[in-house]
Amino acid sequence: MRLGILLSGRGSNFQAIQAAVDRGEIAARVACVISNVPTAPGLDFAREKGLNAYALNSGESSREAFDQKVLEILTRHEVDLVCLAGYLRLLSPAFIAAYRNRILNVHPSLLPSFKGLHAQKQALDYGVKVTGCTVHYVDEGLDSGPILMQAAVPVLEGDTAELLGERILNEEHKLYPAALKLAVENMIEQRDNRGYASRS
């Protein structure tokens, strides 16, 4: 299976996915890496790995026009599955329609709690004792797509958003490759309105 990675920053989850691919844990390869931030460090890592890396400036066009450029690159590389790895843009309906049920994202909370930006601060402000991360399929809503896998992370006394975020990120680096492996191996089935689960 051919993967397309979209990122906006350092791409640490992309690096975790690539490491799992390199170890042979995921039967796929990264066909291309695209960033809406030309200076994103994740692009440097992609180039060091000899991968096809593309920098597109999202400030130069509308969301729809920009997404069309991204879709053209994904189509050129015959991408089967899109992985968002710290991609700080909402996808247009046309993009989601083109890759319906083939876009994965990881979010730093136990969805449906604390959607959107600054999920770690939201968790601290609310006073929860446990938060975590979620891998989910992307739909037209904000962090609202069917949930694939989750991992819990305790909130500790004295936590800051930064400290909590680092512990959540460590779990993301394990959860995202594990969920991607299930998706690549077609081990996912939809269960009514309760999202997705691993085939038994």
Image: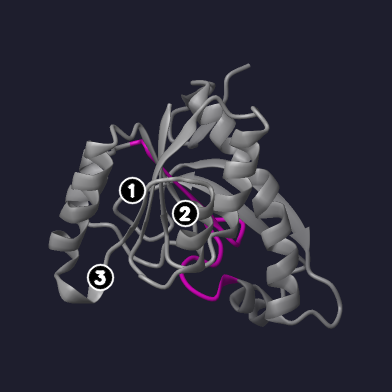
Is residue 176 visible in the rendered structure shown here? no
Q: Amino acid at mark 2?
A: Arg
Q: Is residue 115 left or right of residue 36?
A: right
Q: Secondary structure at mark 1?
A: loop
Q: Residue tagged by mark 3?
A: 58
Q: Secondary structure at mark 3?
A: helix
The percent position of residue 190, horizontal first and vertical second, equals 45, 27
Residue at point 49%, 36% (across, down): 194
The percent position of residue 67, horizontal first and vertical second, equals 21, 56
Residue furthest right in the image = 157
Residue at point 53%, 53% (across, down): 48
**Marker disc for residue 139:** 1
Picture quarter with the C terminus: top right
Is residue 73 visible in the rendered structure shown here? yes
Q: Residue tagged by mark 2?
A: 47
Q: Which residues are magenta?
A: 101-119
**In the image shown, does 74 or 84 lie closer to the viewer?**
74
Q: Which quadrant of the view contains residue 88?
A: bottom left
Q: Amino acid at mark 3?
A: Ser
Is residue 131 placed above or below 48 in the rendered structure? below
Is residue 130 placed above or below 195 in the rendered structure? below
